[in-house]
Every structure is written in structure tokens, then in C-alpha cells.
Amino acid sequence: MTGDALAGRLRDIVGSQHVLTDADLKAGYETDWTGRFQGKARLVVRPSRTNEVAAVLVACAEAGVPVVPQGGNTGLVGGSVPSGGEVVLSVRRLDEIGEVDAVAGQVTAGAGVTLATLQAHARAARLDFGVDIPARDSATIGGMVATNAGGIHVMRFGHMRQQVAGIEAVLADGSIVSRLSGLQKDNSGYDLAGLLAGSEGTLAVITKVRLRLVPQRPHRVVALLALGDTAAAQDTLTALRPGLPSLEAAEIFYREGVELVCEHSGLLPPFAEPYPCYLLLECAGRMDPATELIEALETSPPGPLSASREGGTPRRPADASPILDTAVATDRPGRERLWAYRELHTSAINAAGIPHKLDVSLPPGELAAFERDVRALVAGAAPGARVILFGHLGDGNLHVNILGVPPEDETVDDLVLRMVAERGGSISAEHGIGRAKLRWLSLTRSEADIAAMRAIKQAVDPSGILNPGVLLNTAMDCGR
Ligand code: 2HG
Ligand code: ZN
């Protein structure tokens, strides 16, 4: 089938206005958020129903044309943009959302529903959704399940896979697998929903998801703590956690990130003087958690001395609090202001250049030393590069962003990911492997793991038309 014949067939399926071949119209689907990954799509097709997705996949399979499924295109590892010549299948028009099932505490959402829409829908029914990410206005549910997105509330509610009670998806041959009843107990075979969560569009196109909802927590308090270093932040969190059942976010960032955010957004700095490290805590509940948080901050034991871990001289008296300054907000504008220092990191970094993004997790005991050593490692390998670190301290997840290194030069990526693997971490905490980390998969997944993954891929997509070059690449993912 020629390119034009495929376009014609797809027009018959979805309507001609939903097959984009014009360069200007395709452009928004061809570059990822960072600007680092891009490629020309043969065309973009935008089905609005599951049976259209199935017909599109059959047509592409018959034409032998690979398909890149795409949601809100907020991914950060090049997993939802073409590398050249693929059909981009945008699920954004699959945006139906069902009534909230208050008895089950669940809702069925189309893959193209944005997280913000889902949150508003759940809140109107006095429930909420357990996962939240800064890209909530654009990120779609299908993409979030496909990448098993994590975000800022994982420490309380888990990541996307844990919110999924059922799934509908189209396999490469156009067959539809559908389990959307949301049964709480269903031990009747392989958990396809769990498998598709985190499969990055390589096994199926997710079309609908049955999602678990969580109780609404209308009362919130946010505290921004200034600290001397990562170890002090960890000690503080460890000391506070047992007394704070309402804690749902513990985010870490550093002086250079706050300075970049302020420069980019015009925000004033959070405190009169800058500090090396910041820990943002959010507590939420049905009752106001402000007293609980403030009491915990005043009375929690200081915890182990950070310096003692490294065998150095303690930098504070054993009974002194490591907290150097505190800002607390209970009203919405105040909370949003404190969150802005954290949430604006990604856009401030993007505004400063094309970053190398390494989303990694470490065992808790390794995190503080890693934060220090990774800065030294990058400084040695790429003098002049800027390292901006931030992330989800409660999950041991750091986002290592490096500016000032050409996009195609992967020397620092290699060094950093090897350091992560040596210290028992994961080369992808929550963003996935995509194209960005394909060549390093075997650093933290065994040969047997990769062989099993490849066997699954081969079984459900034998001609390899779904997102080739993402997550698994038979030529490159082993033997490093
Ligand atoms: C976040 O936590 C996202 O804000 C994006 O995971 C991280 O931009 C990044 O590196
Ligand atoms: Zn994150």
C-alpha cells in the first residue's frame, strides 16, 4: 500500500479532518516536551472510538507501517514521538468519561481524558484521584497508564498501575481486550491491565481505563523547610513520617533550582536568604492537618546526625533541629506559591536549554551520597554543565537534569546511569525507558528479565509495529 493509499484508508475510518498530513499540523505531535526527541511522522491519525483504533491498527499492519501511540505528549524519554516515518496515533479524542461509581469508588475514563479533567470529575463526586503530576493539564490517562506515571503522591497512594482496576486496549492485530467491570476480586488469569501499565505503547494501544478513586482530602497544609543538605532532609522526613499519617508529598530541591525558577517565573525567593536544600511537605485530610504538621515540626526528634553517616564531623549539636527556616501555608494561594518553587522546575529548565533528563531512583541509604557524587561526576566529565536536581524524596526518586551538554552527546548520561546501577538504583523511576534510555536497560534489568519482556512483545506484536525502538530494541538492549 502506498503512503497515499494508507492515508486514504485511514480517512475512511476516522474522517478526513482527523488524518493530518500537513507539516504544520503534524508539528505539535513530532517533538517531545524537552525538544530533545523529534522525528517526522508519515501522518497523524486521531480516532475517537475504540473500533476506529482497531481499524487503524489493522490498516497500518497491512501497510507494514509502524505506529506510535500518543496521549498528551508530555513524556520525557522520547517514547511518544516518531523517530521518522511512523504513523502517530493520537488518543486525545478518546475523551469520554463515565459517571463516577460511588459504590465501587471507581470511574471509567477514555485514554484521552486529561488528568485535570479526571480530578475535577472525581472531586465533583466528593472523591479524588490518587496520582497527581505537575503536567496534569495536558497529560492524558492513557499515556499515564502506558508509562506507569508516578508523581507527587506515590508515597501515599502508589503509582498509576495501583490505580488501575481494569483496562480496554487494542492489540497490534486489531483485537480488543476489555475488562472494565472493575471487580475488586478477579483472579482469573494473567493481569493484562498490570502488564500494559508501563508497557510504553509497545504491547497495545490503551483506549479506556477503569480507575480506582480515593477519598477527598479537602483540608491541606504545605510546609517548605530549608535544610543544609540531602541527608538533613532525609533525617527530617524519617523523623516526621510516623507522626504524620496525613503526609502525601515530600519533595526535594536545591538552591540552583530555586534560583532558576525565580529567574524564569519572576517569583521572589522563598526565604530572606538562600539555603542549600529545600524539602516541601504537603499534608491533607478530611480534618485540617495543619496542627498535626506544625506539632510534628516542633516536637519531632531531630533524627540521626547527617554527618555521622559519612563518618565526618557532625555539623550541628545532636539535639538541634536540622531545619534552618520554615514557611507554612494553609490557604490555596499560599500553598500554590510554595508548590510553584517545585513545580516550575521543568519549565524553567526547558526555558534555559535542551536538558539531558535522567529520572532515577536509589535505595534510601544511597540517596544523599549520590546527590553529592553525581554533581562531582558531571563537573568532571562536562565542566561548565549545569546540574539541576529535584524530585520525590519520599520515593527515593531524583530527577537529574543536565544543561549545557549537546543533545547528542550521551557521555554524562552513561556515567550517571552507571553510577545509579552500581549503587543499586533504577535507571528509570517513573518516566519510563522510551528511546532515551534504551541502550542502558540491561544495567538494571537482567538478561532473563529482558528475554521474558522480548518474548511477551513477540507474542502480542509479532510484526513489531507498535512503538518500535521504544523500551525494547532487539539489536541494542542486551550485551552492554
Ligand atoms: C516532575 O516530577 C516530573 O516534575 C518531571 O516527573 C521531572 O522534568 C523532570 O525532570
Ligand atoms: Zn517526577
Image: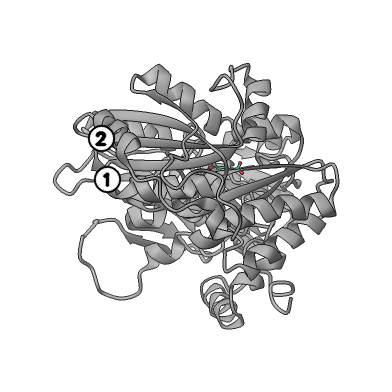
Percent position (x, y) of residue 132? 42, 40
Residue 295 placement, left or right of 43:
left
Tell me if mark 1 has few (under 14), some (14-19) or many (20+) residues whose alpha carbon lies within 10 angstroms of its own.
Answer: some
Percent position (x, y) of residue 426? 57, 63
Quadrant of the frame with the N terminus: bottom right
Label annotation for residue 261: none
Residue at 58% from the left image edge and 73% from the top image edge: 445
In this view, the residue in front, 235 or 159, is 235
Percent position (x, y) of residue 10? 59, 48
Q: Earlier in the sequence, mark 1 or mark 2?
A: 1
Percent position (x, y) of residue 400? 65, 48
Q: Which residue in the structure is indicated by mark 2?
A: 292
Q: Which residue in the structure is indicated by mark 1?
A: 243
For numbered disc 2, what is the local secondary structure?
helix
**CA distance separating discs 1 and 2:** 8 Å
Residue 237 placement, left or right of 362:
left
Image: 446 above or below 468? below
